[in-house]
Amino acid sequence: MTYIQNPSSIEEKSFQIIQSMITEKDPDYVFHSEMEESIIKRAIHTTGDFDYLYTMRFEHDVLKKIEEVIRAKGTILLDSNISLNGINKRVLDQLGVSYRCLISDEEVVALAKEKQITRAMAAVEIAAKIEGPKVFAFGGAPTALSYLIELAEQGLVEADAVIGVPVGFINVEESKEELLQSGLPALVNLGRKGGSTIVVAIVNAIIYQLREVVTDDYVRYSTPSSKEGGKN
């Protein structure tokens, strides 16, 4: 047996297989954009689950809004250290984008204790103090996602875009539906599936697709893609 040892070659081959399986399973599937294609394929690559072809929703120009935050050197706020550890910090650093998970922040811990709320909810309040455009990303805290929507409706938190893909059984589908109905620019995966690794897949797919970086060089980061695709 010949082993492929180059990680980039393995990934490229994986995306080729994913596209061939999409073509086989649903030959009429058409992606709406290269960015959507990259996100959905990377979610499939992460999970091996082709349901993401049909469950991802992109509302209120969310991808445009996320790109605007990135180009404005804003902040990506993550609800778990798993997501924080998984995103490609090298690329984000080149783009000049900040990335934070406040779950263990001392101020967050104190506020959660004072208000008797979860740390993820307290992190949303503390995040409101961060200046500049912000993207909130939830992979495992549906209650905090609902809390963000509530605070945003009250004008207490500004969220330029929200990635809402919590996983689980308690308040997960309800929080996603709230997000879809909120009017906020939102990227949502319907149903119970999602999680921190899907947050990582989404964020990395977006930044790999962006071409312009904050240097004098023009650097390209891309996910293997095809013009064939899905019914999203």
Image: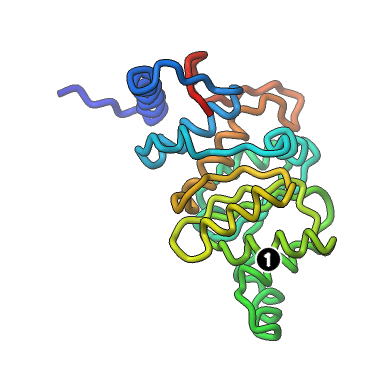
Number of numbered discs visible in the structure rendering = 1
User: Can you say whether 30 is above or below 232 in the image?
Assistant: above
Image location of residue 112, percent across then percent down = 66, 79
Residue position for label 1? 147
Where on the picture, by quarter, is residue 128? bottom right
Per the image, label 1 sits on a secondary structure element best described as helix
The reply, left or right, for residue 161 in relation to residue 18 is right
Please name whichever residue, 192 or 110, is drawn nearer the observer in this view of the structure: 192
The three-letter amino acid code for the residue at tag 1 is Tyr
Left or right position of 18 against 29: left
**Residue 186 x, y percent position in the rendering:** 66, 44
Q: Quadrant of the N terminus?
A: top left
Does residue 5 appear left or right of residue 226 in this picture? left
Residue at (40% x, 25% y) in the render: 15
Locate residue 145, reporting x and y percent.
Answer: 63, 60
In the rendered image, the vertical position of residue 5 relative to residue 91, given as above or below:
above
Q: Residue at x 28, y 25 (%)?
A: 4
